[in-house]
Amino acid sequence: MVPSPFSPCALSRSLAGRGLSGLGSRRLFSSATSSLAPALASTLARSRASSRSSSTANTAVATTYTTTTAFSQPAWIRPTTGPLSPPVRMLTSLREKVKVLLVLYDGGKHAQDVPELLGTTENELGIRKWLEDQGHTLVTTSDKEGDGSVFDKELVDAEIIITTPFHPGYLTAERLAKAKKLKLAVTAGIGSDHVDLNAANKTNGGITVAEVTGSNVVSVAEHVVMTILLLVRNFVPAHEMIERGDWNVAEAAKNEFDLEGKVVGTVAVGRIGERVLRRLKPFDCKELLYYDYQPLAPDVEKEIGCRRVDTLEELVAQCDVVTINCPLHEKTRGLFNKELISKMKPGSWLVNTARGAIVVKEDVAAALKTGHLRGYGGDVWFPQPAPKDHPLRYAKNPFGGGNAMVPHMSGTSLDAQKRYADGTKAILDSYLSGRFDYRPQDLIVTGGDYATKAYGQREKK
């Protein structure tokens, strides 16, 4: 007798074929069968009977349980597997409905006037109707700080949590311990440092953490180049002068330079860092440098006209402009402190669109005040939102300028919001459908281990 495709063994094999082999597939099958026992048992009984009668009847059962939601993915999100096998389709249709917790910033009137502001509590990434049509529950909030916050109260029974780098809901080890049902944490954007990844690997059998890789790399790279130009050309103080009704060309020009002929370097040359270097090439900089544990291919270096240096200290000592484009993890937290900043060229500029905690804010403010740093700009803060007394809100150089800080907005242009909303929906669809066919580059941790080197350079615990 040919085993029914709905048998426990067949289901286990199907899950194993999707990278959920061994203990992981057994846990998933066990969890599914225990939570859906009555319906699943009935279906298995019917499927065995249909298998004994004819293959045609068996096909009819499979058709009955093919209820996955159709989802049109944008061209840049490519699926990684083919059609679902009947066991996975069956499991999908009978699974429990889930609670999704979404943490976003409030848009108020702006979100009402501009529905393309998808990353707001009002517009909810465009996923509410899609989720509710499938019977799932969506709870949306901007209240994320402290034990009494909506975020803290609602996470205890959420199976999926979605947050963004622009208004991060910090998933600390303490919060993860409360989230007994949490299986999937999604970053709507890029950068999952707001999640304690080591704790996620040890919680609930291993929480999957995923982000929408590539969704806003162009947006951030453009912002980096803009910020470099704003600082080097002393644009902000000159514009503030005009707003005051003043006119003093000498005052504006005394701290203004050309980017041409300067040495510019990036800390990390990943998806953003490489794009920054490519966009700087037409400015005829004296040299483009980068520091990264993994070098670019020789032909790419030649095409861009850049050079790798061996140490971070060597990079900062040579550069007129340094831009930070590395992830935040244990080895980069507080990286730009008083000691490293002291090794930078006197009068240099520092740009940070990576993460606020990569720099020691007090040390940056002090270096700006003395003029050792001529300018600091970017859009990332720690914590976020930045408190009103955050030193980098008000830090100035001796000329009264050198500050090009803005809210965390570089990666959340309207174009980027559409991309990371689409990508978030694709990740949700992969999970809720039972396919689990995530794009490999979107996975940060899964199955109790790191899935990427960007966050995986850590001590095994």
Image (cartoon, rainbow, N blue to C red):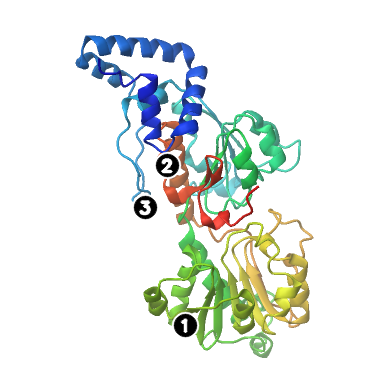
Q: Position of residue 78 (x, y in %)?
A: 35, 48
Spatial CA span between label 1 and label 3: 30 Å
**Foreground disc of the pair 1, 2:** 2
Q: Secondary structure at mark 2?
A: helix
Spatial CA span between label 3 and label 2: 11 Å
Q: Please give left or right for residue 36 compared with residue 170 in the image.
A: left
Q: Secondary structure at mark 3?
A: loop
- In the picture, which quadrant includes the N terminus? top left
Label disc, if present, on residue 283 of the rendered structure: 1
Badges 3 and 2: C-beta atoms under 8 Å apart?
no
Q: Please give left or right for residue 171 compared with residue 218 in the image.
A: right
- Answer above or below: position of 344 versus 450: below
Residue shown at the point (73%, 71%) measured from the top left: 364
Q: Position of residue 214 (x, y in %)?
A: 45, 56
Q: Secondary structure at mark 1?
A: helix
Check disc 3 and report the residue beneath it: 76
Residue shown at the point (69%, 43%) measured from the top left: 172
Q: Please give left or right for residue 302 compared with residue 368 in the image.
A: left
Q: Classify residue 18 by image quadrant.
A: top left
Check disc 2 and report the residue beneath it: 426
Spatial CA span between label 1 and label 2: 38 Å
In front of the other: 88 or 168: 88
Residue shown at the point (52%, 19%) measured from the top left: 35
First in sequence, mark 1 or 2: give its number: 1
- Could you classify mark 1 by the number of other residues whose Cα lies within 10 Å: few (under 14), some (14-19), or many (20 or more)? few
First in sequence, mark 1 or 3: give its number: 3
Amino acid type assigned to the residue bearing label 2 in the image: Ala
- Answer above or below: position of 16 versus 415: above
Badges 1 and 2: C-beta atoms under 8 Å apart?
no
Amino acid type assigned to the residue bearing label 1 in the image: Phe
